[in-house]
Amino acid sequence: MSNKHIRQVVIVGGTHGNERIGLYLVKKFNQDPSLLVRPNLSTTCLIGNPQACNENRRYIETDLNRCFIKADLENNLLGRHEEKQAKVLHQQLGPKGNSENFLLDLHSTTANMGMTLILVNGHPFNLHLAAYLTHHNPHVRIYRWTQGDQENAFVSSLCQLGFAIEVGPIPQGILLASLFKETETLIHQTLDYLEQINRDSSPLLPKTLTLFQHLEVVDFPKTPGGELTAMVHPQLQGRDYQPLNPGDPMFLTLDDQTLFYKGCSTVWPIFINEAAYYEKGVAMCLTQKQDIPLQRD
Amino acid sequence: MSNKHIRQVVIVGGTHGNERIGLYLVKKFNQDPSLLVRPNLSTTCLIGNPQACNENRRYIETDLNRCFIKADLENNLLGRHEEKQAKVLHQQLGPKGNSENFLLDLHSTTANMGMTLILVNGHPFNLHLAAYLTHHNPHVRIYRWTQGDQENAFVSSLCQLGFAIEVGPIPQGILLASLFKETETLIHQTLDYLEQINRDSSPLLPKTLTLFQHLEVVDFPKTPGGELTAMVHPQLQGRDYQPLNPGDPMFLTLDDQTLFYKGCSTVWPIFINEAAYYEKGVAMCLTQKQDIPLQRD
């Protein structure tokens, strides 16, 4: 077990201003902090991008959840709203890579992702916690969004320990009671685990962890001028985490032609048709399903 | 039958810039106008709010689909982006109340509204067409959003003939192939009907039309300061057009208390949890289900 003690848990909601579940969970917890109390654990909550939340927009000038590259955090020439807000969060929660905090960053998606933990590293502590949560909550899936040695730019990359929670499907700008409650439950299960660690008890864990390893992103078919020409195929829509095999329908053109997946091997697409990713040129992320053995101390 | 001939059909998409189905249907039709050709009917398409579409936002400064009050259209002091755009559309499609055009305005919603026609008047021509469409397409429902003598401010109020098509559920900012195709089918069924009218044939119609008459809007429970305190109850979420009886669950507070519907009689809620209506103080619209006999000429 990687049973280091956790000094401080920080829950961030409203990193994206139109993802309302995280925002309203933070408001709820800040109104009644007793909800999060555990005898051996200290937890605080904050709103990632208050101005974007006030305007019910993902961001004001640029995506806050892509602003946490070390060099950018140290670059005083970067002065857009979210670049400045990233520096504020870095001051509070960092320094990046050396923070002792455990960080939960709350997100939601229009894709049918259920309850997903997004890991941005392979730290054993995170893998053990992820295994605990999948074991106790069958709706939880693990997505590891690492790309070789490439530095991650998410809020959650500020701390080695912790992850983003991504829940869906939910449209931008609304609350869904079902997902609100499921997210709240997952937060409590996470705190329960951390409390056990701080008490030096050893939570029961499975021997292997199933995770979905990021492979690559896929854009929508477009004209040379960049105009979208196809939609996610109805047979793929909503089938996040299901296998996509070579030859399976992938897109449907606006004039009703089916385009098929042309890869060489089975992949597991996620973030299928996420609204905020259209502007990023991402129709979905392809992953590889992996069972990894958990190392014990 | 109210079998007056139709001179010109105008299809408007992108009245709201983040409702992508209408926008991309208009793009598709404008790229290949032959798709809409009928021998005795002329049809054109236009984008309602091009700048909002470019920015993938509902509107730039104010909701375009609330800008079509006659006095506002004639008021040159109103100079916000959408107030100006409303005057442009009024020039093209009006004058309000005296236009000979038949207008289809394409919208989408995060609510589970299926394929809804929104009527803003009780013109027999529209009622007959609505009856034809419900008869030929079992997914179609009719919502009449009239409020006594109050003037309607929607784009579709520019013309006596025509209506808005509201499809859902779909998050803002994305395309869904299934709803894209259903909307396209509904447009073709509408044009087929109008073509028959212009040929002086009499389409077969049922004797009665079931429609949902607007009663009132209901806001979310809020603190005196205006802070939202509850969500749509999970047992009501997605149940647009289903009866809501006195004593049925309506909202769930953020701290998990159920609030019940306190009306005196059964209502049929629609636009349940529509993202764009949070800022308008609308959690849902209550309607009365009515069967109305169709008058024959």
Image (spheres, coloured by chain):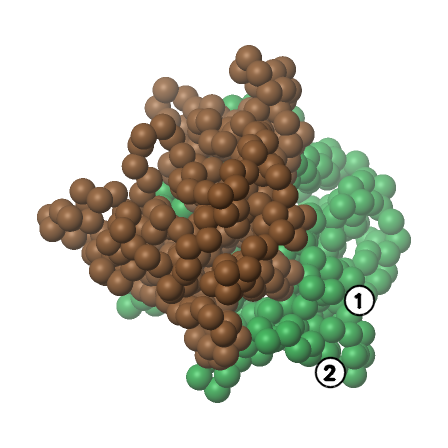
Chain colours: A brown, B green
In which quadrant of the rendered view does residue A44 lie? bottom left
Label 2 sits on a secondary structure element that is loop
Label 2 sits on residue: B262
Spot occupied by residue A104 in the image (x, y as percentages of width and height): 44, 56
Chain letter belonging to callout 2:
B
Q: Residue at x 40, y 34 (%)?
A: A146
Horizontal side, residue A18 vs residue B218: left or right: left
Spot occupied by residue A150 in the image (x, y as percentages of width and height): 31, 32
Q: Given the image, on which type of amino acid does mark 2 rest? A: Lys
Look at the picture and state if A262 lies above or below B103. Answer: above
Q: Residue at x 47, y 31 (%)?
A: A214
Which residue is at the far right? B207
In which quadrant of the rendered view does residue A247 lie? top right
Label 1 sits on residue: B243
Q: Residues within 10 Å of mark 1 (few under 14, many from 20)?
A: some
Label 1 sits on a secondary structure element that is loop
Q: Residue at x 22, y 44 (%)?
A: A70
Taking depth in this image into account, of B95 and A122 the one nearest to the observer is A122
Residue B81 visible from this viewpoint: no
**Mark 2 vs mark 1, CA separation in Å:** 14 Å
Taking depth in this image into account, of B157 and B139 the one nearest to the observer is B139
Q: Given the image, on which type of amino acid does mark 1 rest? A: Pro
Q: Residues within 10 Å of mark 2 (few under 14, many from 20)?
A: few
Chain letter belonging to callout 1:
B
Taking depth in this image into account, of B168 and A195 the one nearest to the observer is A195
Horizontal side, residue A152 vs residue B259: left or right: left
How many marks the image carries: the answer is 2
Spot occupied by residue A158 in the image (x, y as percentages of width and height): 31, 51
- Name the N-terminal-most of marks 2 and 1: 1
Q: Are marks 2 and 1 in contact (CB under 8 Å)?
A: no
Q: Residue at x 27, y 51 (%)?
A: A98
